[in-house]
Image (tube, helix red, strand yellow):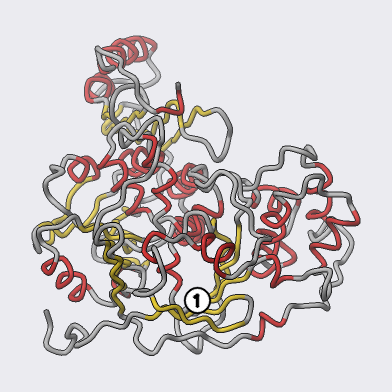
Amino acid sequence: MKNDDPMPAEWAHHLTFALNGRKVVVDGNTLPRFNDLRLIDYIRDHAGLTGTKLACGEGGCGACTVVLCHRVSPSSPLVHRSVNACLIPLASIDGMAVLTVEGVGSTKHRLHPIQSKMVDNYSMQCGYCTPGWVMNMYELLHTSDPSSLTKDTIENHFDGNLCRCTGYRPILKAMHSFGIDGPAPQLEYESSYDEVPFVDADEPEFEFVDRVPSVVWWYKVLTLEQLSAVQAKHKDESVMVVGGLTSRGVSKYFNQTAPYNRPVLSSVLVDITSIPALTAIVPVSDKNCLSVGAAVSLTALLAALRQTASDNPYLETLAHHMSKVANHQVRNAATWAGNLSLARAFPSFPSDLVTGLWGYGASVTVLVASESRAMSIDAFLAIPVTQNPLLVSLELPLYPLSPLRTFKCHKVAQRKENSHAHVNAAMMIVRNAQQVCTQARIVLNGVGTQVIRCHLTEKALINQLVTDPLTLDATLGALHADMPSQQQPLDPFKW
């Protein structure tokens, strides 16, 4: 631990945030079940704001959508993120502002234009999903250039919102009215929430202890040194570093808790989303790669890839594949490191991200027993469960553009979004001027008990003319040989 960055002499125990424009201070050591509370539990049961609905409880339907707002620094603009309140831990929102549908508008005061448009277009029947649609559109209007709001952009934004009544047409008609193809919306009304100043806790490093029914610790750390100190303090316990903790919506199907399917969390949870070293996305010129910190959300990673992909078709392919992971609200909270860690803990989890990154040739930097190691994706997945590796960064090579390099990703699922893959694949093929394969990397997931690299298939391709039909025949035979010999029940979503 650095001398200029010591652990706090005394941890703070108060959570400070804003809820619909009002400052809230919660004592984490006195609020019952604090470390087990999700944001939606506090909103509905403690704050009495029942507009936010609890439905699936795993981030799949969007009924619980709220908007989180925060600043990177006191002088920076507000960042708006629509998230699933059924997944977000209450303890993770320190220093943030939370906006629910009541804070956007109501019949008691005045409806927001989004709500008015939904009324005008008869966009609800039972109304249970309506708050989630309103909140997700609210985020879109606050994070997008109005000139970019095409029908496709608007519709793609709602991959995490379900409705079982209206058939979607009247809902989307209301949302399309805010796009470039609709009439100019009248947005003169804004909720008073938009004037809320930056909410900053006096002591951002904090520790919460919940001793009923068993000891559960929650830490928010600001440096890697603090994280190491917490790990040392709890060296004999199970320590889990968390970003958005969206894994609770998935892990319950893989952790042998059926038929009840409940998430099982560690006794020590450490929030790493405030560590600057883990939230950065920077190009590394000497390695010709993009380095992405472990606490970077999937949405932030997607934005960085798309910005770089304007002249890089390989990153564009990876970004398109990554956009199929979960849905918008989940991606706003989930981190790439959490996804890889989930795949390491549960090898049968058909992670689209693992498949795409491995096929792309990405590598990771990992802290194992305080030692920093650079390794491939498959090497990370193979680290024994008895060890507790910490993902630090992801390195994405910036390949030189060439018509002789091909990178493709594929996914077969029940739906085109918000669905686990039945089978997914990623492959990188490099040819020479004579169309002979010089490099091959082929990764498949969902065809066995875990993700696999098809070494025999790659061997059958390398040094072969890719346009020769005989090469195709040999490759298909090798691919068959690469397949696991024994099929077992895998992803429970295939049952």
Q: Is 408 drawn above or below residue 191 in the view shown? A: above
Q: Is residue 267 left or right of residue 367?
A: right
- Of 430 and 380, nearer the camera is 380
- Which residue is rendered at x = 11% and y = 67% of the image? 232
The residue lying at 62 percent from left, 71 percent from top is 99
Taking the image as shown, residue 90 lies to the left or right of residue 63, namely left
Q: How many marks?
A: 1
Q: Position of residue 354 (x, y in %)?
A: 34, 41
Lateral position of residue 229 relative to residue 400, left or right: left
Q: Which residue is mark 1?
A: 96
Determine whether the residue tagged by mark 1 lies in a helix, strand or loop: loop
Relative to 403, is 77 on the left or the right? right
Q: Quadrant of the N terminus?
A: bottom left
Classify 228 as above or below 467: below
Quadrant in the picture for residue 435: top left
Identify residue type, mark 1. Met
Residue for point 69% across, 65% down: 101
Q: Is residue 168 above or below residue 206?
A: above
| Crowd tier of the residue under label 1, counting other residues whose Cα lies within 10 Å: few below 14, some 14–19, many 20 or above | many
Residue shown at 25% from the left, 42% from the top: 344
Who is closer to the viewer here, 173 or 469? 173
Percent across and percent down for residue 131 are: 70, 57
Quarter holding residue 426:
top left
Q: Would residue 421 be seen by someone viewing this image from the given angle?
A: yes
Q: Position of residue 171 (x, y in %)?
A: 79, 48
Looking at the picture, tell me which residue is in the foreground, 139 or 214. 214
Q: Which corner quadrant of the image does residue 91 belong to? A: bottom left
